[in-house]
Image (spheres, helix red, strand yellow):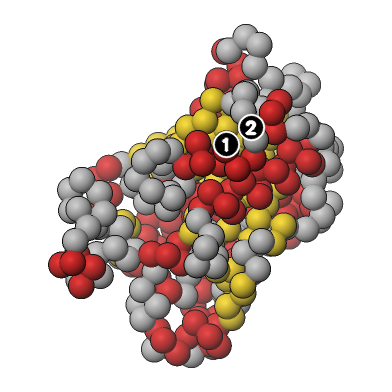
């Protein structure tokens, strides 16, 4: 695992006033205390490249040993080419096939499934880097409290490689419902509404989100993901050592987890320190748990993600005890 958070940190005292709310309001309603923000010269690929290099270092391999590089993001450097290709160039992963997966905040787990299947079915391949990254600050309206207080920037990556038969990923379950695609989106800049002076004036290049619908979706899908995953593996809540999830709102996560019966000490929350970093949320939480020594060898980790699209997914990960960086890289 490897991660990268931009060096600039914004607390609630700085974010609140432009959005018309107090620092206390943000804390009480979201649980977010601070978030990291990329500099003007930093794009998603810059953050992702730092995370991939950190993951390669932790895994003890060189970037040119990667056979595959999959980037998950909804804030790419540009509409084309794939941001994965930008990351490949920045990291020196010259022998990797590079591509993007777009599934919003669920993207990293979708990308991990692609890499897992690729390695399992492609003779001669050994290592894949899977990175989730977002540069949301480039697309946030600082005066819109529903998004400005939540979304932030960051990246986290994993190197996938050979593991014993009883370790690694098991039982990916992924899903989507495109009928809800309009609930969270950046309306302009694509082929449907190309960017122009009118779209900029209307703020259509900013993130638009129906917060109430998203909240209800998470409250419904999170328990369903947990139930299905446990049933599929014949396990109980007590059999899971750590629950790693997307981090849209720490307060909401804790509330839903409590209703399910997940012990508080097994739900690993990082969103209070990072805000919502989209496709990077789940891998960042996993990297953080590993770096803090919370995952023993053969620990069972249930990963649950949910995001725009609408998209969702889960996977059971049996941790192998591989090394991890002790702290996120800052750049």
Q: Quadrant of the N terminus?
A: top right
Q: Which mark is residue 303?
A: none
Residue contact between numbered discs 2 and 1, judged by CB atoms under 8 Å: yes
Q: Residue furthest top?
A: 123
Left or right: residue 185 versus residue 111 is left
Q: Determine crowd level at label 2: few under 14, some 14-19, many 20+ residues with C-alpha closer than 10 A.
A: many
> What residue lies at 53% left-to-right and 85% top-to-bottom?
14
- Residue at mark 1: 88
Image position, residue 137 (x, y; %)? 46, 67
Viewer-proximal residue among 79 and 159: 79
Image position, residue 40 (x, y; %)? 50, 67
Helix, strand, or loop for circle 2? loop
Image position, residue 60 (x, y; %)? 82, 34
Helix, strand, or loop for circle 1? helix
Viewer-proximal residue among 8 and 170: 8
Viewer-proximal residue among 292 and 79: 79
- Residue at mark 2: 93
Left or right: residue 114 versus residue 60 is left
Left or right: residue 263 versus residue 134 is right
* Total labels drawn: 2
Q: CA distance from mark 2 to mark 1?
A: 5 Å
Q: Earlier in the sequence, mark 2 or mark 1?
A: 1
> What residue lies at 59% left-to-right and 81% top-to-bottom?
11
Q: Is residue 43 above or below residue 93?
A: below
Q: Residue furthest left?
A: 198
Q: Determine crowd level at label 1: few under 14, some 14-19, many 20+ residues with C-alpha closer than 10 A.
A: many
Q: Is residue 43 above or below residue 305?
A: below
> What residue lies at 80% left-to-right and 50% top-to-bottom?
325
Q: Is residue 170 above or below residue 240?
A: above
Image position, residue 19 (x, y; %)? 40, 84
């Amino acid at each position: 695992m490897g991660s990268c958070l931009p060096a600039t940190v914004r607390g609630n005292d700085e974010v609140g006033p432009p959005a018309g709310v107090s620092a206390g309001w943000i804390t009480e309603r979201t649980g977010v205390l601070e978030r990291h923000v990329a500099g003007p010269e930093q794009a998603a690929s810059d953050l992702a490249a730092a995370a991939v290099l950190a993951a390669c270092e932790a895994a003890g391999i060189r970037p040119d040993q990667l056979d595959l590089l999959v980037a998950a993001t909804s804030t790419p450097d540009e509409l084309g080419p794939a941001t994965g290709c930008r990351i490949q160039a920045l990291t020196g992963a010259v022998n990797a096939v590079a591509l993007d997966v777009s599934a919003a905040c669920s993207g990293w787990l979708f990308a991990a499934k692609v890499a897992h299947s690729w390695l399992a079915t492609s003779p001669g391949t050994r290592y894949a880097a899977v990175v989730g990254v977002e540069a949301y600050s480039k697309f946030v309206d600082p005066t819109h409290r529903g998004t400005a207080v939540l979304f932030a920037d960051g990246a986290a990556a994993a190197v996938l490689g050979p593991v014993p038969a009883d370790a690694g990923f098991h039982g990916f379950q992924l899903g989507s419902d495109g009928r809800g695609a309009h609930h969270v989106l950046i309306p302009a800049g694509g082929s449907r509404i190309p960017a122009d002076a009118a779209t900029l004036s209307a703020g259509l290049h900013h993130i638009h989100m129906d917060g109430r619908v998203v909240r209800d979706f998470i409250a419904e899908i999170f328990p369903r993901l947990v139930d299905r995953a446990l049933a599929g593996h014949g396990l109980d809540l007590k059999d899971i050592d750590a629950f790693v999830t997307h981090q849209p709102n720490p307060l909401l996560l804790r509330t839903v987890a409590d209703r399910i019966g997940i012990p508080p000490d097994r739900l690993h929350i990082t969103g209070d320190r990072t805000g919502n970093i989209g496709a990077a949320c789940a891998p960042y939480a996993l990297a953080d748990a590993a770096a803090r020594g919370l995952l023993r060898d053969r620990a069972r980790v249930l990963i649950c993600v949910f995001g725009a699209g609408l998209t969702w997914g889960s996977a059971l990960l049996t941790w192998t005890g591989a090394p991890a960086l002790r702290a996120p890289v800052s750049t």
